[in-house]
Amino acid sequence: MSYYRILGLHDEPFSTSPDPSYFFLSAQHKAALTRLRIALSLKRGLSIIVGDVGTGKTTLSRKLAQVLREEPDVSFHMILNPYFKTQKQFLTRLVTLFHASVDPKRTTGLDCIEAVEQFLYKTGVQEKKRIVLLIDEAQLLPDYVLEILRILLNYETNEYKILQLVLVGQMELVPVLSRMPNFWDRIALKCVINPLDFAEARELIQFRLQQAGYKGEKLFEEEAIRLVHQHTKGYPRQMAMMCHNLLETLVMRDRNVVDEALVRETIAKELRPQEPETAERVPSVF
């Protein structure tokens, strides 16, 4: 039997998979999601969300996808692996994503661009839908793909941008885009996702346990949570991994609560991640 069922849970509360139902809306995540939805509803064009590895960017993007797919006026599309070897490969992917009409006997880059352009105007202008393209791990995008995206962002009516592009990536995406002034100037929304502070870390643990169906007494002592936060530096993915290990140990030892001693013992056995001693918070708007 899985450890979480022994604890009276119906799901694994600390999975590292980007499940939107376990997405904890900290103040900064909620602000980013709200600002994203506003930018998309106003059809402002380009938005970027950046943060360090493990801060919850991918889960945020899945939550956004879940919300947008429920809106009938939205044509939502997502690219999870943005590594493309050629311009043609990327354009072909867009044609497939958009179900754009293209003559199979004529599939040059120009043919693909024209097919995508026709789709944008038909869907975004004639059918009046919001076309949203979200690209995760955007720091991997080669320059020639960014140039194509810049061209697509030029498609607009007198009132709005036809394509709504959301780039989600690690912090190294920022210097890449800043070196391209004609791309950087098109960014309508810029947000940074930071690690959680202690209060947010405590809320995340409680939220995930509740989502998984926990109804018992307090499972984590306050000092235990404080040590978890200190050791993981507030990175949600690291917190999830550590809490998973703690609950497994709790069950194996037939104990009822995660206390400070158990956390210290777990930390002593772990190989510490090679990260800075303190997580420096970055302004959420830059």
Image: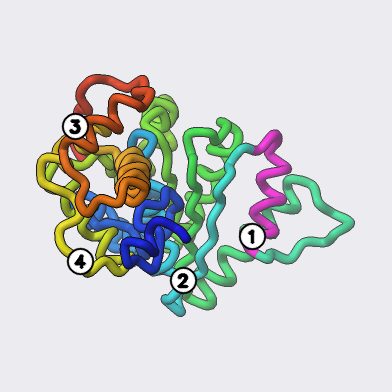
> Which amino acid, by three-letter code, is at mark 2?
Arg
Q: Distance between the residues labelled 3 and 4?
A: 26 Å
Q: Nearer the viewer, mark 2 or mark 1?
A: 2
Towards the viewer: 31 or 144: 31
The three-letter code of the residue at mark 1 reads Leu
Q: How far apart are marks 1 and 4 (CA)?
A: 46 Å
Q: What residue does disc 3 label? A: 230
Crowd band around label 1 with a 10 angstrom C-alpha radius: few (<14), some (14–19), many (20+): some
Say if 280 sits above or below 42 in the image. Answer: above
The dot on residue 97 is: 1
| Residue at the image point whose x is 54% and y is 50% from the top | 152
The residue at the point 64 percent across, 60 percent down is: 97
CB of mark 1 within 8 Å of CB of mark 4?
Answer: no
Query: In the picture, which quadrant includes the C terminus?
Result: top left
Query: Which of the two residues, 49 or 230, is positioned nearer the viewer here?
Result: 230
Please give the label number shown on residue 216: 4
Task: Give how far across and how far down residue 165 sits, in percent.
Answer: 45, 52
Q: At which x and y percent is residue 70?
A: 43, 76
Relative height, residue 152 to residue 83 (above, below): below
Measuring from the top left, give residue 214's x and y in whole percent.
26, 66
What kind of element bears circle 1? helix
Residue sticking out furthest to the front: 254
Looking at the image, is mark 2 or mark 3 nearer the viewer? 3
Q: Is residue 150 left or right of residue 159?
A: right
Mark 2 residue element: helix
Q: Earlier in the sequence, mark 4 or mark 2?
A: 2
The magenta stretch is 84-98
Task: Please check the rendered image and state whether residue 87 is part of the magenta-colored stretch, yes or no.
Answer: yes
Q: What element carries label 4?
A: loop
